[in-house]
Amino acid sequence: MRVDDAQIQLRVDRKPAHFRAEASGGAVQMVASPLQVSARCQVEPEFSYRIAPDDFMSRTSPRDASWKLGFMQVQILETAWAYYRGAQSADGCQLNDTAARRSSKVCRDYDRSSGTVWYEGSKSIGDCYGLPDRSRRPPWNLEFYFGDSPDHGMPAKVLNEQTQRYNYLREARCALAFVTTLTEGDQGVHKHHRHFLWSAIWHIQAASTEPQKVNTTFRLLAGSGFWISEFKRGGPIDRRYLDVLNNSSLTPSANEVVEGALVAKSVASDWQRFPLMDRKDKLF
């Protein structure tokens, strides 16, 4: 197949909004509305093409197609800490950092249980890939979608090991950054036609200034929100990102890496602010 580079169109259909924190069942979840990007491409066969009888009946799942267009995604940065403190200073405070001890800082973001390295941003698999309708004559106009709903969760309270008192979520920050590619797959070989970077940031603080056991409402602090780069030709130039994108093995996903990481804890027997809380996020 030949992809007409001049005909490639990417469009942001929906940007994440309504960044907030929701408390339920002993946990606090940072959420936002979804991101959606649509892709339109025109492709045609490399050589002369005739419609064969079998072309009228699709027998191949998009995941198994030998040639297809789709999206790939790599998580490239993460900040994720949660600060807890007791109702009184003598109850102490604690900072949990869930990003510091991750085994891999750059990792593929996908559903490893799907058995494919492609990012499938919809429950409808057919929406995730661009495949030619071989019952029609070329050139073929393909349309497919990328979608993501980033979030992050943490406990609403922790037990302070020094004071043996419960500390409750007072402030938290989560900053997630990704590189996403529009990629052509041909017999297991990947060609990245476009890429873009994007990030989502939550920085929350308990809405109540009075000491209380469990905070159920939180306010969003400055710097929270969504950012996306322009759409750029080709794949990313950073070798770390390309090495992950071009690795066809089913390596641990971003979610699996996060879930398997040990939490780095900083504990104090009185109220204090830890240096990490004022550190700026890394640039990418």
Image (spheres, rainbow, N blue to C red):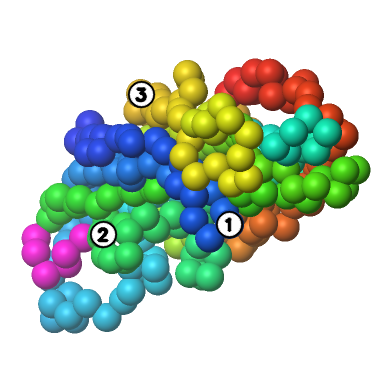
Q: Which residue is mark 1?
A: 26
Q: Please check the rendered image and state whether residue 250 is part of the magenta-colored stretch, yes or no.
A: no
Relative image position of residue 259 (x, y in whole percent): 67, 57
- Tell me the mark number nearer the camera, choosing from 3 and 1: 1
Q: Amino acid at mark 3?
A: Glu
Q: Which mark is residue 220?
A: none
Residue named by callout 3: 230
Q: Give the percent coordinates (x, y) of residue 108.
A: 57, 50
Q: Nearer the viewer, mark 1 or mark 2?
A: 1
Q: Quadrant of residue 231?
A: top left
User: Which residue is label 2 attached to?
Assistant: 127
Query: Can I make out residue 257 in this image?
Result: yes
Discs 1, 2 touching: Cβ within 8 Å: no
Query: Left or right: where does residue 201 sit relative to residue 107?
Result: left
Magenta residues, dominant SS class: loop
- The residue most toward the left is 136
User: Would you say 170 lies left or right of 140 here?
Assistant: right
